[in-house]
Image (cartoon, rainbow, N blue to C red):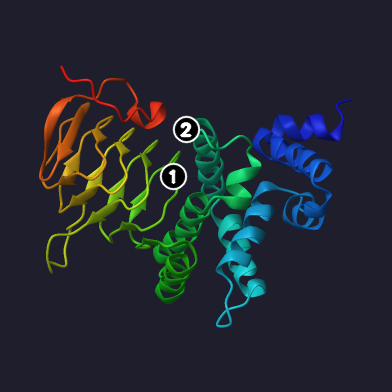
């Protein structure tokens, strides 16, 4: 008969690895034992550990951790895809960020990862018609992590937001699967119109630091947006764009820019 640890690894390999890394971390730094035990080893599942972590991060004098934990637990029970997306985002961060050496790191320390999981909670609340709670979560994400994502925005799975500071994603923005973006990215509008006014980012896109993508435009799958660019027009799939305003400067250079994270351009 398989041991409990082997059974867990088969059922949820991500959670099994996090628990193993947590035990190693305590052995290496006993002073972290209490924090890591209450944050990981005390919990029976990845969903429970993530709900606990987010509740602590989002808590304030206005709304305590206990009620937030109940809200998050309810969301995860009602919509397991929230937890599946969190696993995909965690693995994406580990695979793409050279500063990430353990699965434990995004869960405990990376505000980009934590911010997008909190956004996913806010989006679920928005879809349930619980708008004020969704706005509260958006506010706390902005205050706590320096990331402002409207809860109505739609974001796919396997998304990494590296460093994450000053990222802004507007109400009608759509972000596809397996997208990577760096700090100070804006997916914004260009005026006061109230309808569909924000960018639509395809799958596998890499958005460099400080890039601004503005208006109801489409960025094709597996394209690259260079750091500091201002994109105001539709971009076809598998292209590299750069400049202010941005223009197409070449091909994307690889099949999946968001995974390779290669931001260099060698010309044609």
Please say if 28 is above or below 54.
above
Direction from residue 66 to residue 34 in the image, left or right = right
Residue 96's disc is 2
Direction from residue 54 to residue 220 in the image, left or right = left
Residue 91 position by quadrant: top right
Direction from residue 10 to residue 76 in the image, left or right = left
Of helix, strand and loop, which one carries label 1?
A: loop
Position in image of residue 42 (x %, y %): 80, 54
Please say if 50 is above or below 248.
below
Position in image of residue 111 (x %, y %): 51, 54
Please say if 11 is above or below 29.
above
- Quick one: 222 or 195, which is closer to the camera? 222
Q: Give yes or no for contact between labels 1 and 2 (Cβ–Cβ under 8 Å).
A: yes
Residue position marked by numbered label 1 in the rendering: 162
Q: Which comes sooner in the sequence, label 1 or label 2? A: 2
Residue at the spot 56% in from the left edge and 60% down from the top edge: 75
**Quarter of the C terminus within the rendering:** top left
Residue at the spot 72% in from the left edge and 55% down from the top edge: 39
Residue at the spot 18% in from the left edge and 42% down from the top edge: 218
The answer to whether residue 213 shows anywhere in this view is: yes
Q: How far, Cα to Cα, is label 1 from label 2?
A: 9 Å
Direction from residue 154 to residue 215 in the image, left or right = left
The answer to whether residue 42 shows anywhere in this view is: no
**Quarter of the N terminus within the rendering:** top right
Please say if 238 is above or below 102.
above
- Quick one: 128 or 212, which is closer to the camera? 212
Of helix, strand and loop, which one carries label 2?
A: helix
Position in image of residue 122 (x %, y %): 45, 63
Residue 12 position by quadrant: top right
């Amino acid at each position: 008969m398989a041991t409990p640890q082997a059974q867990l690894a088969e059922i949820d390999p991500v959670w099994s690895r996090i628990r193993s890394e947590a035990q190693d971390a305590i052995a290496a730094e006993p002073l972290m034992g209490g924090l890591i035990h209450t944050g990981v080893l005390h919990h029976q599942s990845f969903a429970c550990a993530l709900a606990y972590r987010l509740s602590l991060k989002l808590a304030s004098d206005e709304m305590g951790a206990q009620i937030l934990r109940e809200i998050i637990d309810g969301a995860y029970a009602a919509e397991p895809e929230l937890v599946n997306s969190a696993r995909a985002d965690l693995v994406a961060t580990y695979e793409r960020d050279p500063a990430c050496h353990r699965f434990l790191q995004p869960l405990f320390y990376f505000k980009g990862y934590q911010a997008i999981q909190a956004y996913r909670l806010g989006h679920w609340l928005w879809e349930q018609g619980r708008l004020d709670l969704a706005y509260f979560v958006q506010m706390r994400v902005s205050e706590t992590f320096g990331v402002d994502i409207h809860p109505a925005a739609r974001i796919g799975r396997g998304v990494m937001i590296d460093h994450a500071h000053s990222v802004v994603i507007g109400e009608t923005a759509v972000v596809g699967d397996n997208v990577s973006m760096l700090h100070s990215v804006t997916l914004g509008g260009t005026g006061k119109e109230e309808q569909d006014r924000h960018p639509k980012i395809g799958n596998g896109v890499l958005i460099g630091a400080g890039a601004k993508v503005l208006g109801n435009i489409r960025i094709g799958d597996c394209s690259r947006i260079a750091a500091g660019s201002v994109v105001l027009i539709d971009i076809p799939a598998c292209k590299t764009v750069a400049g202010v305003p941005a223009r197409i400067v070449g091909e994307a250079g690889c099949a999946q820019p968001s995974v390779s994270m290669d931001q260099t351009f060698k010309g044609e």
